[in-house]
Image (cartoon, grey):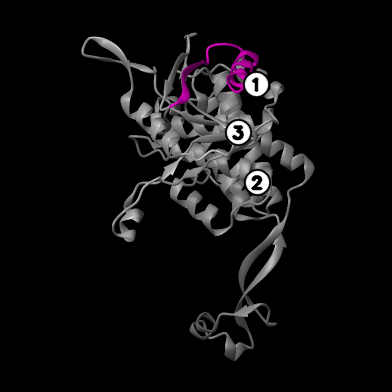
Amino acid sequence: MVPVATLYYFLCYAWQRLPEPALLRQAEATPFGRPLGLLAQVLLRAVRQRLRAGLPQQFEEQIAALGVLRGRVMLSASVGRGLLAQGRAVCAFEELSADTALHRVVAATLGGLAQAAGLPAALRRDLHQTERQLRQRLGAGAEADNAAVSPAAPTAAALAALRRRSPPAATDDLFLLNICELIAEVALPQPTATGRRRFRDFRRDPVLMARIFEQFVRNFYRREQRRYRVFAETIAWQAEAAHAPDMALLPTMLTDTTLAAPDRKIILDTKFYAAALRPRYNRLRLIAPHLYQLYAYLQNQRSAPGQALEGVLLYPGLAPAAPLAYTLGGHPVRVVTLNLNQPWAGIAADLLGLVE
């Protein structure tokens, strides 16, 4: 199980956000054992910072019946409501406002967290108070104050639709959307009809954690070192086919992280598994598909002249483990376990030492 403090760094780098030691200390002092409290603290702090700085505005589409034409006239709606005879029409127009789709999603997420039974009462009060302040800034304070129950947190599908419709350009906007998406992804309906939600510990979700771990490692190297260019790389198969269309049927080879310098290229594949070794026929062995995949990447990779090529399989772990080293197909390959059960300074040093 990934320690909560380490998980915080995972999320910060995965979402391209600088870690805040003060927030980490505050989260560690809060009496909760699951990451929901951490997510709530991170979102609460980000929203409060945004409220203090002033909510950014953007052009949002508004639809209203007007006596003066503005923007796009919605003829069907105007005729259906009999407005044309009154000298009015339904118009769709853009208006600069802080009442954006993202801010409404954030407010709904705060409201959903404020009802989470797994959070301390004091934290739930802070979440509810901040939700009310946000809604007041958006011009919906009266509705929020009079509502008996805050609106339900948005679904993952609704958040995905928001990302597709208007992807945030600002880093802070993207951070808010990322955390709201994660909170929605780990929310489950209560077995009762109270409208509340329960939140699963997403550290037990191997698919979700694999995605976070991969993004964390790639963005860590992008930010913390300057020798290599860091990217996810599509590798072309060194293959031929009698019929050219058959080439399109080959699976895509996409690296988790490629680190490239003029003299050295590292293909680093992250695997979120409990251990790099598995018992097989009463003996511990490396996980075959992981090694086969990395070997295929190395064999089909064309490195630049004078550029040494190597591969790394990186696993998370909660105890120190000696790395394994091989030469496969003429290329150095290492199997490394990153000890997550240590202070962050040690984790960062181990990652940087991996590519020195």
Residue 331, magenta (yes or no): yes
Q: Residue at x 42, y 42 (%)?
A: 253
Q: Residue furthest front?
A: 305
Sort mark 3 into few (<14), some (14-19) or many (20+) by Cα contacts within 10 Å. Answer: few
Which part of the image, by quadrant, shows the N terminus? Answer: top left
Magenta stretch holds residue 216: no
Label 2: which secondary element = helix
Count residues near mark 2 (Cα–Cα under 10 Å), then give few for <14, some for 14-19, many for 20+. some
Which residue type does callout 2 highlight?
A: Asp
In the rendered image, residue 243, in percent from the top left (x then y), is placed at 29, 59
Type of amino acid at the residue the image marks with label 3: Gly
Q: Classify residue 206 by image quadrant.
A: top left
Residue identified by numbered label 3: 306
Is there CB contact under 8 Å for labels 1 and 2?
Answer: no
Q: Is residue 72 left or right of residue 52?
A: left
Cα gap from disc 1 to disc 2, whole angstroms: 21 Å
Q: Nearer the viewer, residue 236 or 58?
A: 236
In the rendering, at what x and y percent does residue 250 appear? 34, 49
Who's the residue at 51% across and 80% down the image?
77
Which residue is painted at 51% across and 82% down in the image? 81
Which of 96/232 is in front? 232
